[in-house]
């Protein structure tokens, strides 16, 4: 029978694992953390905090096994000491219990959610974007086409999640009539529009066929999964950490970069001024957070990535085109999330779908709009010198 964590037995569990002592229990504080899994935050003496997570189990007592992928990143660092420097920009995992699907992290109290920072500060410093681009480029560059790393991620394929990218792309490619009996009423508008755009379906089908697994990828790299050091302006060390590696696998680097940049584009699109008296074009132009405000960070992140990993353009001349398409794909995923959780698909969703359609169907023409001319010019210069 599966052991299920709760606020009463968590401390005893941690003592058994050697992660805390009896003497710490009396002064400790336990708080539930809202998430898809069962999460508890423990505050201990000496400002030490632990985040304890357990995957939800189904009626048969089985979990999805997502924490296996999170833990596999730690095993990667243990097996390949040359990657040990990654620890400074990854989560600090202290313990993993595969049998009970429990994982324990050191809670990074001196960091904050990057999306929260952007939302509250209404500021998008290029220094932060450059740091993220450098880190992501480093991970992709160091593992790109290295057989030893690919073998590491494929050796326990029974415990790994399947290749989610191709599955998600192909799932959208084939929208069957049965979907109309599953989605909420408001969501039918999305699928009706989606099926009306033949070029969109063709672009998604082509993107699915173009997925090229070639390095370690995060596969869920949105701004909510990046932490920013609270005193980042006064720090000389890494100021960001990439967290939640539960979907990580041997994947396509364009998907990671596209998903990440898609989060920036979503900030623009979710700030639209929506009114029946405004056209979609007017709403896009009147956004509270205009794309022009985000573009410097998008460009700085992409330039930092390409400066760190310029070889990607030699191996994949169409790399940035695919990144733009994956930005569009990320927007469609966002729409699906809105339909699933908010049960809505209104004018904002329609505007998002229009932008996604342009990015997926006309990626080359969309590059200057997303990246700015500096990135497009850098791509030309880099390609000419390789």
Image (spheres, helix red, strand yellow):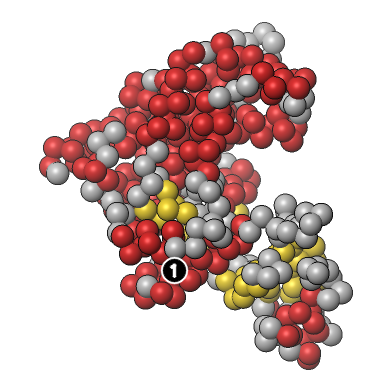
Q: Check disc 1: other Cα within 10 Å, few if <14, some if 14-19, many if 20+.
A: some
Q: Quadrant of the C terminus?
A: top left
Seen as rendered, the residue at the extreme left is: 385
Q: Out of 93 and 286, give the one closest to the viewer.
A: 93
Residue 31: quadrant of the picture: bottom right
Residue 206: quadrant of the picture: top left
The residue drawn where x is 41% and y is 64% is: 152
Residue beneath label 1, please? 76
Q: Is mark 1 on a helix, strand or loop?
A: helix
386 shown above or below 65: above
Q: Quadrant of the N terminus?
A: bottom right
The residue drawn where x is 34% and y is 31% is: 321
The residue drawn where x is 53% and y is 48% is: 162
Residue 25 coordinates in the image, percent (x, y): 81, 84
90 shown above or below 301: below
Report the side of 192 relative to 362 (left or right): right
Residue 286 coordinates in the image, percent (x, y): 57, 20
Residue 64 coordinates in the image, percent (x, y): 66, 55
Count numbered badges in the picture: 1
Seen as rendered, the residue at the extreme bottom is: 23
């Amino acid at each position: 029978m599966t052991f299920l964590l709760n606020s009463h037995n968590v401390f005893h569990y941690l003592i058994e694992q050697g992660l805390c002592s009896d003497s710490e229990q009396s002064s400790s504080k336990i708080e539930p953390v809202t998430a898809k899994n069962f999460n508890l935050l423990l505050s201990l003496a000496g400002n030490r905090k632990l985040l304890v997570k357990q995957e939800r189990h189904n009626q048969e007592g089985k979990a999805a096994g997502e924490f296996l992928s999170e833990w596999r990143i730690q095993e990667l660092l243990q097996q390949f000491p040359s990657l040990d420097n990654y620890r400074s920009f990854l989560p600090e995992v202290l313990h993993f219990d595969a049998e009970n699907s429990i994982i324990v992290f050191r809670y990074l109290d001196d960091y904050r959610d990057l999306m929260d920072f952007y939302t509250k500060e209404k500021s998008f410093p290029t220094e932060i974007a450059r740091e993220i681009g450098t880190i992501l480029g480093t991970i992709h560059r160091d593992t790109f086409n290295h057989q030893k790393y690919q073998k590491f991620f494929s050796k326990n394929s029974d415990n790994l999640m399947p290749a989610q990218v191709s599955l998600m792309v192909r799932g959208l490619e084939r929208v069957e009539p049965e979907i109309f009996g599953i989605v909420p009423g408001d969501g039918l508008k999305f699928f009706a529009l989606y099926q009306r755009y033949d070029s969109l379906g063709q672009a998604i089908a082509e993107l699915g066929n173009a997925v090229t697994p070639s390095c370690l990828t995060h596969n869920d790299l949105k701004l909510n999964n990046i932490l920013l050091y609270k005193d980042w302006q006064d720090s000389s060390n890494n100021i960001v950490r990439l967290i939640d590696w539960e979907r990580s696998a041997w994947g396509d680097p364009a998907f990671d970069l596209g998903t990440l940049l898609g989060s920036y584009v979503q900030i623009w699109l979710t700030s639209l001024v929506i009114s029946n008296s405004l056209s979609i074009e007017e709403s896009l132009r009147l956004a509270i957070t205009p794309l022009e405000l985000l573009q410097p960070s998008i460009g700085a992140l992409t330039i930092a990535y390409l400066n760190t990993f310029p070889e990607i353009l030699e191996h994949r001349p169409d790399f940035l085109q695919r990144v733009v398409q994956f930005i569009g794909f990320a927007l469609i995923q966002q729409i699906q999330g809105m339909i699933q959780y908010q049960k809505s698909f209104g004018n904002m969703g329609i505007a998002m779908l229009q932008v996604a359609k342009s990015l997926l169907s006309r990626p080359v023409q969309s590059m200057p709009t997303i990246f700015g001319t500096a990135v497009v010019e850098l791509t030309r210069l880099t390609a000419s010198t390789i």
